[in-house]
């Protein structure tokens, strides 16, 4: 069985925020979470969620792709591989070391939290650590990436989930520019809920989408 979709020429989500720093990161992440909720409601686990596996439509909306690791829960005909699969920097710690664990909804939520960080910063998790195995060990020890800091990262705009830098010319697409956006307390707290060491303590897609709705309403209320 194969799936065919319309060609999306805006590239993936990571390329999109690097080429268009003014993109509202909160809205982008909310769209990704909505897609993930749709999968989870059908008992489908993506298994390899990250910025590179989200493409952007002509209207600037995120679309989840690359279901090579996806599985349908509670159905042995679609069971996930027991080998170490996926990209380590986005992979939940329990999936990295447990033989036969396969992919899980909680694992998707861990990856979603890492994807949020990736799209707010324009960089992969633990970007200064070059060795993937070193990152794996950090996750096993309960370590997580640092919160984007205005002082450390030179962030110019921390009030509306957008960077102030002009769009990058097409030939620069994919390169990291000044695209980092500061995460306020509410957003950082929600990301940390996705990163909980105990999978049972992580936010679900329903809870996370409810948070996005609450957050957007709060932002609008603050404008009044």
Image (cartoon, rainbow, N blue to C red):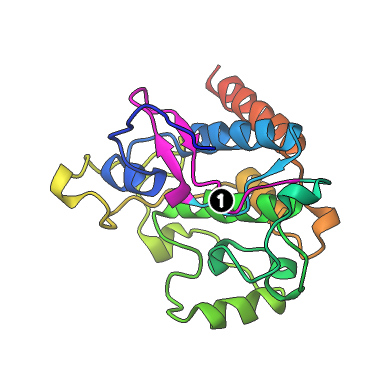
Residue found at x 39% / y 62%: 153
Asked if residue 11 lies in the magenta stretch, the reply is: no
x and y percentages locating residue 222 in the rendered image: 58, 25
Residue 88 relative to residue 101: left or right: left
Give the labeled residue for mark 1: 49
Check the picture and name the quadrant holding the C terminus. top right
Residue 91 relative to residue 115: left or right: right
Part of the protein shown in magenta:
51-72
x and y percentages locating residue 64 in the rendered image: 51, 39
Give the answer, above or below, for where 111 lies relative to 39.
below
Give the answer, above or below, for where 50 lies relative to 224.
below
Residue found at x 67% / y 62%: 81
| Residue 146 visible in the displayed image | no
Residue 134 picture quarter:
bottom right
Q: Nearer the viewer, residue 98 or 179?
A: 98
Residue found at x 64% / y 32%: 212
Residue found at x 41% / y 29%: 5
Asked if residue 66 lies in the magenta stretch, the reply is: yes
Q: Nearer the viewer, residue 86 or 155?
A: 86
Query: Mark 1: which secondary structure?
Result: loop
Residue 86 picture quarter:
bottom right
């Amino acid at each position: 069985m194969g799936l065919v979709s319309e060609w999306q020429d805006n590239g993936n989500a990571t390329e999109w925020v690097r080429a268009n720093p003014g993109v509202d990161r909160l809205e982008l992440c909310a769209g990704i979470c909505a897609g993930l909720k749709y999968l989870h409601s059908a008992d489908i686990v993506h298994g390899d969620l990250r910025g590179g596996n989200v493409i952007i439509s002509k209207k600037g909306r995120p679309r989840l792709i690359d279901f090579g690791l996806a599985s349908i829960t509670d159905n042995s005909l679609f069971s996930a591989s027991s080998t170490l699969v996926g990209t380590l920097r986005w992979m939940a710690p329990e999936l990295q070391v447990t033989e036969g664990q396969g992919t899980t909804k909680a694992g998707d939520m861990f990856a979603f939290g890492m994807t949020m960080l990736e799209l707010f910063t324009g960089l992969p998790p633990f970007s200064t650590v070059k060795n993937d195995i070193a990152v794996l060990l950090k996750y096993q020890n309960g370590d997580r990436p640092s919160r984007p800091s205005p002082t450390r990262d030179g962030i110019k705009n921390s009030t509306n989930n957008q960077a102030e830098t002009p769009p990058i010319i097409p030939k620069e697409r994919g390169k990291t520019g000044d695209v980092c956006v500061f995460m306020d307390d509410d957003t950082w707290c929600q990301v940390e809920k996705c990163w909980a060491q105990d999978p049972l303590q992580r936010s679900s897609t329903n809870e996370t989408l409810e948070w996005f709705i609450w957050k957007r309403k709060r932002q609008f209320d603050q404008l009044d």
